[in-house]
Amino acid sequence: MKLFTRLALTVLIATFVPIALLGLIMKGFLTYENFILLTVMLGLLLTAGLYISIIRPLDALKRGINKVKDGDLNFTLEVENDDEIGELTASFEEMRIRLRESREEKLNYDSELKDLISNIAHDLKTPITTIRGYAEGIMDGVASTPEMRDKYLKTIYNKSVEMTGLIEELSFYAKIGTNKIPYNFTRLNIKAYFDDCAEDIGIDMEAKGILFRYKCSVEADTKVIADSEQLHKVISNIIGNSVKYMTISPKRIEMELKDIGDFVQCDITDNGKGVDKKDLSKIFERFYRTDTSRNSSQGGSGIGLSIVKKIIEDHGGRIWASCETGCGLSVHFILRKYVEVNINGEKDTDNRG
């Protein structure tokens, strides 16, 4: 019952019941003493009704407001009435829940950021120590031949690249937390893009002594809407994750791009130790590392695959992993094809952009 209806009904009862009782007095059916008693009882009942339906819910709402003001969000307000006060209480309760969830998310984010900074600070010590050592070697004349100087300089360069990657991950994670990842979506010829990526990856893997195989069964004119730079980060992070945790020789990574109807699917598979099936759903969580093949002894920030998941989902795609224990890890992701629609609202299969 709405509040206005309840108040109007209370006024009607408080007005007409005493009038009716006076009529009974005039007809001799009721004495003045009983009239007074019944009127007092009616007043008490109406007051109790107003207290239960209005005053008590407002008091509860006031206590809730004071708790929120004091920073206490761990309570529950029960909605007692189906009226305006009940609606206000329900809205307040929804606000409280959202505030609590927001606070918990912030606490989790702050904790994760603290862990990330700690991880990166720890991982930066090794390349910094190496760079300092090799720089001192050059200054002290330890690298006395051109070949040794070239080796020292190459090591310094590689370690600086490693440091840059860690710092970029920290910067990117901060953008994830504020939802400010810079995307530049364009129509991308996905086959040509992956062909170029595969060529660069092949050269890099050859230098690392890793066998790399690439297969593509997507038509040459297939396009997707994607950010080429962020998509490159996805591929690099997955490949880098595989390289980091492969301990079985000969090391091998395979990448396949295939057509699955309205989507293109990329599969990247390594022949490392893999991940237990119970952990597959967790490997895209921030800072998650398994206790077996993919553990903290390998270093890294622990957010590489979570970044991958975020980028793919922002592209409207989906990512998941599969593996057989001892047979490596496969990471799969899909992106929707771009298809132009002609003036009649039909798909133009001859020109997809």
Image (cartoon, rainbow, N blue to C red):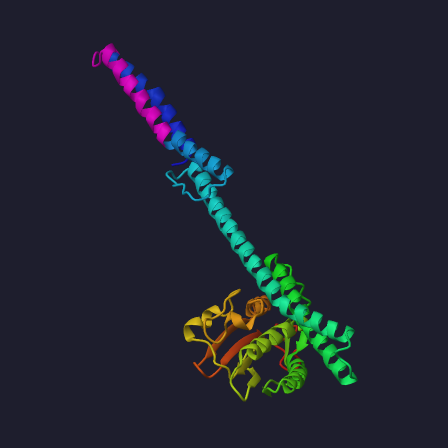
Give the percent coordinates (x, y) of residue 10.
Answer: 37, 26
In this rendering, the answer to whether 15 lies above or below 262 is: above
Q: Main secondary structure of the magenta part?
A: helix
Q: Position of residue 103 (x, y in %)?
A: 52, 49
Segment colored magenta: 26-52
Q: Is 66 placed left or right of 121 in the picture?
A: left
Q: Quick one: which residue is furthest to the left in this view?
A: 29
Q: With 226 as the anchor, is 29 left or right in this view?
A: left
Q: Position of residue 212 (x, y in %)?
A: 60, 87
Between 139 and 266, the residue placed more toward the observer is 139
Q: Is residue 50 magenta?
A: yes
- In the rendered view, tell whether residue 95 sits above or below residue 235: above
In reply to whether residue 322 is colored magenta, the answer given is: no
Q: x, y (%) of residue 151?
A: 72, 81
The residue depicted at 35 percent of the width and 21 percent of the height is: 14
Name the quadrant of the C terminus: bottom right
**Residue 81, quarter of picture:** top left
